[in-house]
Image (cartoon, helix red, strand yellow):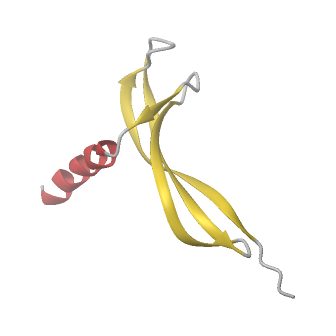
Amino acid sequence: RMLFLFGLRSKAKVIGQLERTCSKCAKPTVQSAIETQRWFTVFFIPLIPIGGSYAIRCNLCGLTVKGSPEIKKQLAAPKAMAAGA
């Protein structure tokens, strides 16, 4: 007999910071852009990426709203401009 341990795991990481007005607390604040990636795991080792999602979280009140993949491009644009200057 062979025993296989498999499952799913989600990993979240902050990919950048945005200055925006929060829709809940109505204050201009810094918000975190978060990328979450789901993985298929075997013996707790992530092997195959299954999908991902993006979210934006207010650092003041904690409100989290769904984001789009374009947020990653928006965060990369200022860095590219700064490197070229």
Furthest residue toward left: 85
Residue 65: image location, x then y, percent = 48, 29
Residue 40: image location, x then y, percent = 60, 66
Quick one: quadrant of the C terminus? bottom left
Residue 67: image location, x then y, percent = 40, 36
Furthest residue toward top: 26
Quick one: quadrant of the N terminus? bottom right
In the rendered picture of this protein, how many numbered marks are placed on residues? 0
Furthest residue toward front: 1
Residue 44 visible (yes or no): yes
Q: Quadrant of residue 31?
A: top left
Q: Residue at x 65, y 70 (%)?
A: 41
Q: Residue at x 33, y 48 (%)?
A: 72
Q: Nearer the viewer, residue 62 or 28?
A: 62
Residue 33 visible (yes or no): no
Q: Nearer the viewer, residue 19 or 10?
A: 10
Q: Residue at x 48, y 56 (%)?
A: 51
* Side of 13 relative to 67 (left or right): right
Q: Nearer the viewer, residue 18 or 74?
A: 74
Furthest residue toward right: 1
* Side of 53 relative to 18 (left or right): right
Residue 84: image location, x then y, percent = 13, 59
